[in-house]
Image (spheres, rainbow, N blue to C red):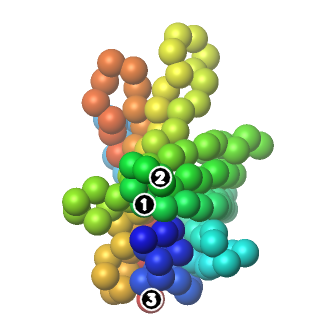
Amino acid sequence: MDIVQYLTPLLGSWQGENRFRLMPTDDFKDSAATSTVTVTAAHFATVAYTWSDGESPQEGLLLLAGGMSQADPATAVWADSWHTGRALMQFAGTVGGDGVLRLHGSYAAPTGPDWGWEIHIHPGEGRGGRLTMHNVVPGEDPYQVVELALER
């Protein structure tokens, strides 16, 4: 299976809710969200989405390629107006036995070792889907920062 086949149940336009928190002790803040999942250049898929931080509209884009196995992992680049600023973040990952695509990347921390960032795509069997994002602080358990829950 390749990334296009994997994301076929999610193709199209979606709406729902985004939940965001900065630190693991913070409460989640909810906002309306939209997403459009498309096939691009035959072998790639994009997940474009919108959300808000208070009154400030935000948007992001995930461009995915590749397969879904250890031998041919999925790869992705991600940009988000709030999370990545002007930079692109690179990811690689595979689908687990639960059907969730887990992408792993990293970013430079102000001091010390790089921190990790994970994006998980939960396909939801055509009813809807979820995209979650997790911060990975060195020496700590990952914690969820974002949940984008979508419906038709």
Tell me which amino acid carries mark 2.
Pro
Q: Residue at x 49, y 26 (%)?
A: 115
Callout 3 secondary element: loop
Where's residue 49, x and y in %?
59, 68
Q: Mark 1–mark 2 contact, CB under 8 Å?
A: yes
Work out whether 125 lies above or below 82: below
Q: Residue furthest top?
A: 112
Q: Which residue is mark 3?
A: 152
Q: Residue at x 72, y 75 (%)?
A: 41
Q: Which residue is mark 2?
A: 73
Where's residue 125, x and y in %?
31, 82
Mark with earlier residue (1, 3) = 1
Q: Residue at x 40, y 26 (%)?
A: 137
Residue 18 shows in the view: no
Tell me which amino acid carries mark 1.
Met
Measure the alpha-carbon separation of dots 1 and 2.
Answer: 5 Å
Which is in the foreground here, disc 2 or disc 3?
Answer: 2
Q: How dense is the environment of label 3, judged by Cα within 10 Å: few (below 14), some, or many (20 and up)?
A: some
Screen quadrant of the C terminus: bottom left
Measure the alpha-carbon separation of dots 2 and 3.
Answer: 28 Å
Q: Is residue 113 left or right of residue 98?
A: right
Which is in the foreground here, disc 1 or disc 3?
Answer: 1
Q: Which residue is mark 1?
A: 68
Where's residue 96, x and y in %?
28, 56
